[in-house]
Amino acid sequence: MLRLAVVYRLCWCGGSDETPGGRSVVVFAKRNYGLRAPVEGELNHARFIEFSAQTRVSGVDLRWENGAACLIRKGAAAQVIQWVKTSGGLVPPRPDGSPTRSPPRATTC
């Protein structure tokens, strides 16, 4: 069930990412789980973050009238880690216990 939830959220992010990497997430979600990316206006209180070469991330911000929010990003791992830290979040240690550091340039998450 967790895997499906992760794929669903990645699919939301991929909907605003027209790069081959972004589109491949949407194709994977559709082919393997029957999911599709939402379109602008379909999700109430959603703001899609388009992928750009400068940010190297895409995503979606979901905010509700009661103040609750869910911010989802995918993209270059170093940029996602930086975004999490800048947003006040914590990056968990790696499973082997070594400190988390920015991964190699080509890694995505």
Image (cartoon, rainbow, N blue to C red):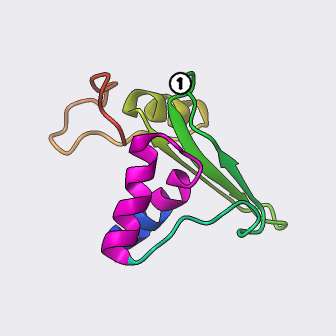
Considering the numbered disc 1 on the image, is that residue within a helix, a strand or a loop? loop
Q: List the residue tagged with mark 1.
A: 53
Compared with 51, 48 (above or below) is below
Quadrant position of the C terminus in the picture: top left
Task: Name the image quarter holding residue 2.
Answer: bottom left
Q: Residue at x 50, y 70 (%)?
A: 36
Horizontal side of 91 relative to 93 (left or right) equals: right
Decide which of 97, 43 is in the foreground and name it: 43
Question: Magenta segment, which residues?
Answer: 10-33
Task: Name the image quarter holding residue 35.
Answer: bottom left
Residue 13 pos. (x, y %): 53, 52
Q: Residue at x 32, y 68 (%)?
A: 3
Quadrant position of the N terminus in the picture: bottom left
Decide which of 33, 76 is in the foreground and name it: 33
Secondary structure character of the magenta stretch overall: helix
Horizontal side of 95 relative to 52 (left or right) equals: left
Compared with 57, 101 (above or below) is above
Residue 97 pos. (x, y %): 19, 38
Decide which of 56, 64 is in the foreground and name it: 56
Does 21 lie within the magenta span? yes
Compared with 78, 75 (above or below) is below
Q: Residue at x 42, y 70 (%)?
A: 5
Compared with 12, 58 (above or below) is above
Residue 56 pos. (x, y %): 50, 29
Q: Residue at x 46, y 57 (%)?
A: 10
Q: What is the crowding at mark 1: few (fewer than 14 residues within 10 Å), some, or many (at least 20)?
A: few
Does 26 lie within the magenta span? yes
The type of residue carrying mark 1 is: Ala
Can you name the residue that lies furthest to the right here?
A: 65
Horizontal side of 93 relative to 47 (left or right) equals: left
